[in-house]
Image: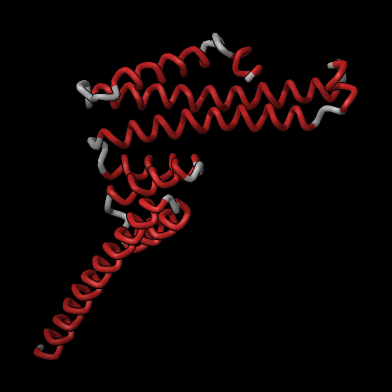
Amino acid sequence: MKKALMIASVLVIAVISTACINNIAVQELNNKAAEFMQKGDYESAMNRLQASLDLDSTMYETYYNLGVASINAKKFEKAIEALEGGIKIKPDFADFYYSLGIAQSEYADEIIAESEASAEENKTPAEKINEVNTVMEADIRIELSEAKTKAIEYKKASVENLKKYLEMQPDTKDKETIEALIQESEAFINGDDVEQTAKE
């Protein structure tokens, strides 16, 4: 009996000390990530924050910081994944919805820009000059249409998240800027500025 109690107490001590070591490591990784973010080295910050989440995936702050670092690094898919992960842990943290809305909106813009750039690259010099209707142009239009559909989905999600943020933080100092972004996204969703976006 004494042997069993001794083994159990050794296991408890081992578990507690492992948890303490993990907490120290997580804190060190988060502190180092903060240093990298202040220097503008978002890739290194992302690596530290991901390592921190690998050790302890219960800290909503780490998800938030990973989302923000990913937005700054223009890694919008990673940002969306991190912020959605954080919302599962702490759905009442308003800043998640703001940052997620920004990430989704910027990702939608990136999808359209990349699709348009790809379509332009695929044109032959004669097509660029004459804009001849060819099978290739039809394929380009399909690709642009698919990209637009995907971008609209992200813009809709962005609008939902930004509105949720405003509901949670009605007195935010950025209210006018956020409302303008919502209006811009809604115009894109409704096709009001599709031609203008294509020209830019």
Q: Give the image quarter of residue 162.
A: top left
On the rendered structure, is 74 left or right of 62? right
Identify the residue at the far right of this view.
126
Relative image position of residue 105 (x, y in whole percent): 47, 28
Identify the residue at the far left of this view.
2
Residue 199 to residue 109: above or below: above
Q: Nearer the viewer, residue 125 or 8?
A: 125
Relative image position of residue 103 (x, y in whole percent): 44, 34
Residue 129 to residue 71: above or below: above
On the rendered structure, is 20 left or right of 69? left
The N terminus appears in which quarter of the rendering?
bottom left
Q: Residue at x 34, y 57 (%)?
A: 35
Relative image position of residue 97 (x, y in whole percent): 33, 32
Q: Nearer the viewer, residue 44 or 194?
A: 44
On the rendered structure, is 123 left or right of 68? right
Identify the residue at the far bottom of this view.
3
The C terminus appears in which quarter of the rendering?
top right
Relative image position of residue 49 (x, y in whole percent): 38, 56
Q: How is the protein colored in the picture?
A: secondary structure
Q: Residue at x 22, y 26 (%)?
A: 169
Q: Residue at x 17, y 78 (%)?
A: 13
The total of numbered circles placed on residues is 0
